Amino acid sequence: MKLTEFIKEKPGFSAAIVFVVGLVAILLLAMLAASITFRRAEVASIYNNVKVKITGIESRSDIWGQNYPREWETWKKTQEMDFKSKYLGNMPEDALGARPDMAILWAGYAFARDYSAPRGHGYAIDDMRATLRTGAPVDGAPDLQPGTCWTCKSPDVPRMMKEVGVENFYKGKWSDFGAEVVNPIGCADCHDPDTMSLTITRPALIEAFERHGKDIRNATLQEMRSLVCAQCHVEYYFKGDEKYLTFPWDGGITMEAMEAYYDKNEVTDWVHAVSKTKMLKAQHPDYELFLLGAHGQRGVSCADCHMPYISEGGVKYSDHHVMSPLKNVSSTCQTCHRDSEDNLIGYVYERQDKVLEIRNRLEPELAKAHILAKLAWDSGATQEEMADAQKLIRQAQWRWDFGVASHGASFHAPIETQRVLSHGLDKALLAQLTLKDVLYRHGVTEVTLPDISTKEKAQAWIGLDMATLKEQKAGFMEKVVPEWIKTAIQNNRLSAPQAQ
């Protein structure tokens, strides 16, 4: 019997069905309304019962944590060191030790001393003090870095910029702010204390937008969930003698556009100690490469994957345990991708494998180009003879560094990163061919490459006295850093429990 005929024969039964369906619908709506009301009530209670009134730039995140305990508890997990994926994780890892060719690539630059994989945001200050790249300004020893180097490490930075002025902060010595920049990356870096809205606290990003005729205050909330990260996770350089932090975005955010900007403005980060080439050092163009990848092009934000939402009680909030999405695939990848955790992780590794295959081919060839250049200089080559090779070396290393300095580039934009690294390999090999012609003209027909198979051998070959550098750093950590911390506590810049 058809349903229409059944309803005609038994109208009472159909009415009962309609009544039950309506009752269920009303019940569901009531539950939804109750849930919304409960959530609103709990959210309202958070804002109406703040324990601490935060005014100005409050750099101590534990103070914010009294008002926002959920976010604070998850932020503290950035100090955990319990995760290791196929490539990196949140624990210390000596990248220079694993890939000693990099010591050759950075000869004459501080990165040749020390280059480790980054840990969580909670270690930003600790790692900054401890790295050999910041030197050991103690007992009259000069600073190795300017004040600009603190820019991305702490919410104390915007506070100090306000107190001393942006220009004075940048051109000051790194050690000038040791007792002031003491809190690791935290709440005040990204949030307005009055509204808790996302906000930009670093001038370089605002200035980069302004040079394009854009007002960053017009960004959408979804855009801001990436832009607060783009304050630091970008390519930048220290402009002029004032070391003014600047984003080279005037012509675009691609590798070629930024290279053209640097070439036009005759930017040189350092002169290579081996090849005598005027070099560029890529920082970490994470945001730029992310925008060139599939997720960025589809409007996904950094926070969508690195700070997924958590529902707890009646409140939905962002997980501030900022780290690899692979640690918690169910809350990150699987919110959009309906596939198994094993498959999703496998897709990530597949992309990383293919990108890093090119990286691993490029690094030794680029190191070889620098070594051949040194041999050419030692054999009497002139600047005119070396000009073409040096141009190729600069271009090759810029492409290598652009691809490897970016955190997550091999997944964020695997196609673009493979393209960039492949072009770097091409230019490194062309540099070698050019140098072999120079060497042949100077009677060099056989080349014996040095043994740089370990970090220690590579550092020794480029002339670094690592024993002395480590001894100086140990003295700095023992004498200077405790005084910085003591002064910060006395000046109420750092909560004592944090210092411990």
Image: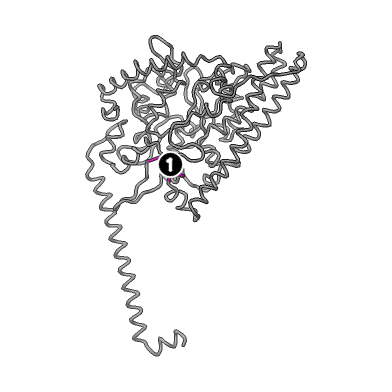
- As drawn, the residue found furthest toward the top would be 140
Image coords of residue 406 (percent x, y): 52, 34
Residue name at image x 64 percent, y 26 percent: 366
Examine the rendered structure and indicate whether residue 315 appears above or below residue 179: below
Q: Is residue 324 magenta?
A: yes
Q: Mark 1 Cα within 10 Å, few/some/many (few <14, many 20+)?
A: many
Residue 429: image x %, image y %?
Answer: 69, 28
Q: Is residue 315 left or right of residue 296?
A: left
**Residue at 41% across / 14% down in the picture?**
137
Which region of the structure is painted magenta?
321-327
* Residue at numbered disc 1: 224
Query: Is 135 or 341 nearer to us in this picture?
Result: 341
Asked if residue 43 is among those painted magenta in the image, a careful observer would answer: no
Which three-letter amino acid code belongs to the residue tagged 1? Met
In this picture the colour scheme is: one colour
Image position, residue 354 (x, y; %): 60, 41
Judge from the rendering whether residue 240 lies leftward or rightward of residue 52; answer left or right: right
Note whether residue 206 is visible: no
- How many marks do you count on the picture? 1
In the picture, the quarter occupied by the C terminus is top left
| Relative image position of residue 160 (x, y in whole percent) | 35, 24
Q: Return the residue nearer the eye: 38 or 386.
A: 386
